[in-house]
Image (spheres, rainbow, N blue to C red):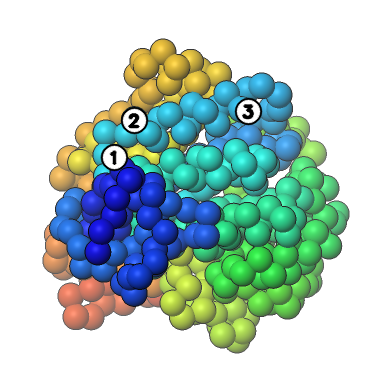
């Protein structure tokens, strides 16, 4: 095979060739019809693949519960930040290291124009060519997508969509401050399928203000009707520095009590199993083979690069957080000054703690030997019915999932 007239970068199984059309080679696969990234089987050996996260900080509005690094901003700052994110990726110290997963989160990635989103995505593909079969996800607000945008994303190489539904009750969506309504969730799901996405997640939240158990089960009914491949079900938590926190402090927000929260969680566990979803993490359920590979990297303590305002990365034992505000972040990129405003080196003790804390969220549990957990500590949580043990591993029981933090403390 001969590739001429273009810039070629070689990685394990992937090559970026600016002038190669893929003809006359049965071992070549293009990621997306508009992409310059091609799969070459068994070509080179190089650095090990890692996860890649890109943070898009913009949202149409700031939801009342949201403590993420997001900003309801429009105008020139959006394009300026898009350019800065693209530049940060292109300057990456890990350029050439392949991506095992790519995840665009936020904020609301799909608030960007398709051209802006795909410009950043192209920079990722050129800097971190994905391994064969890589999961490539974008979060999407149902109120910011349509068939045209999904079609462009799928053609470029995205293969997984995570829809931020949160609720199918319009009253809940209004309370939460979401811009979409229930009908838009269903339209977005159909649009994603029509665009060729065969891997779709739906995010839902429970224990919302004034939410009843009946209302929660109605949400599950409508989620199942969409036939997503993956469902994430999260209990609302009230974080400081949010509008909801201030409302709770003033006594203006009526939330379900702890018993009701437990009932809602148990409902979702039981009903997802009945609907042929397997629970693989405390809050996540999937059809076989559709577990979120990107999040599994986090829960298993693997390495990941983070790009964009407020993005967090963990590479070579160093964890860093980028400057959060889009203006400050963009200025740092433009001025070629330091992007990380927080960083720490994760020593063996901290890494062990995180492996236990995050790994126990998974149904597969953790290896008790490599994490050096004392047998006496394991016996105590087993006796309390919180943990089961076997073949050198330990994992949470259904009762243990309700007291995950207490289990972690008992094992450290």
Mark 3 crowd level (few <14, some 14–19, many ≥20, 10 Å Cα)? many
Quarter the N terminus occupies: bottom left
Q: What is the number of the mark on residue 289?
A: none
Q: Position of residue 375 (x, y in %)?
A: 16, 68
What residue is shown at x 38% (from left), y 49% (from top)?
Answer: 19
Say if mark 2 contacts mark 1, CB within 8 Å.
yes
Q: Is residue 40 left or right of residue 386?
A: left
The dot on residue 78 is: 3
Report the front residue among 401 and 70: 70
Front: mark 2 or 3: 2
Of 310 and 214, which appears nearest the observer? Answer: 310
Rendered view: 253 above or below 273: above
Residue bearing the label numbered 1: 95
Residue 275 against residue 191 in the figure, above or below? below
For label 1, count other residues whose C-alpha is less than 10 Å away and answer few (under 14), some (14-19) or many (20+).
some
Estimate the spatial distance between the alpha carbons at disc 1 and disc 3, rounded to whole Å.
25 Å
């Amino acid at each position: 095979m001969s590739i001429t007239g273009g810039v070629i970068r070689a990685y394990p199984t992937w090559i970026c060739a600016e002038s190669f059309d893929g003809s006359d080679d049965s071992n070549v696969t293009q990621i997306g019809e508009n992409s310059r990234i091609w799969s070459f089987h068994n070509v080179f050996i190089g650095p090990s693949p890692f996860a890649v996260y890109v943070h898009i900080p913009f949202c149409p509005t700031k939801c009342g519960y949201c403590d993420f690094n997001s900003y309801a901003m429009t105008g020139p700052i959006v394009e300026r930040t898009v350019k800065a994110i693209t530049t940060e990726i292109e300057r990456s110290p890990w350029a050439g290291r392949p991506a095992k997963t790519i995840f665009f989160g936020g904020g609301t990635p799909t608030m960007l124009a398709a051209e802006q989103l795909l410009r950043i995505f192209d920079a990722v593909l050129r800097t971190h060519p994905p391994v064969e079969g890589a999961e490539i996800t974008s979060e999407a607000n149902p109120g910011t997508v349509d068939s045209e945008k999904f079609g462009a994303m799928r053609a470029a190489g995205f293969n997984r969509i995570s829809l931020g539904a949160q609720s199918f009750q319009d009253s809940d969506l209004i309370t939460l401050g979401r811009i979409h309504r229930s009908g838009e969730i269903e339209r977005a799901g159909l649009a994603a399928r029509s665009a060729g996405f065969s891997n779709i997640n739906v995010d839902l939240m429970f224990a919302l203000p004034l939410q009843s158990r009946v209302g929660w089960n109605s949400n599950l009914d409508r989620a199942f009707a969409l036939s997503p491949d993956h469902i994430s079900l999260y209990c609302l938590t009230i974080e400081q520095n949010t509008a909801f926190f201030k409302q709770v402090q003033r006594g203006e927000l009526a939330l379900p009590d702890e018993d009701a929260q437990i009932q809602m969680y148990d409902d979702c566990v039981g009903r997802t199993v009945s609907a042929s979803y397997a629970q693989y993490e405390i809050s996540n359920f999937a059809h076989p083979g559709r577990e979120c590979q990107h999040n599994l990297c986090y829960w298993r303590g693997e390495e990941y690069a983070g790009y964009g305002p407020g993005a967090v990365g963990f590479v070579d034992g160093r964890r860093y957080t980028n400057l959060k505000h889009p203006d400050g972040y963009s200025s740092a990129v433009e001025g070629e000054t330091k992007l990380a405003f927080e960083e720490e080196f994760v020593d063996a003790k901290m890494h062990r703690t995180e492996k236990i804390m995050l790994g126990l969220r998974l149904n597969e549990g953790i290896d008790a030997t490599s994490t050096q957990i004392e047998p006496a500590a394991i016996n105590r949580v087993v006796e309390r019915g919180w943990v089961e043990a076997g073949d050198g591993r330990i994992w949470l029981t259904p009762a243990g999932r309700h007291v995950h933090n207490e289990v972690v403390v008992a094992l450290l």
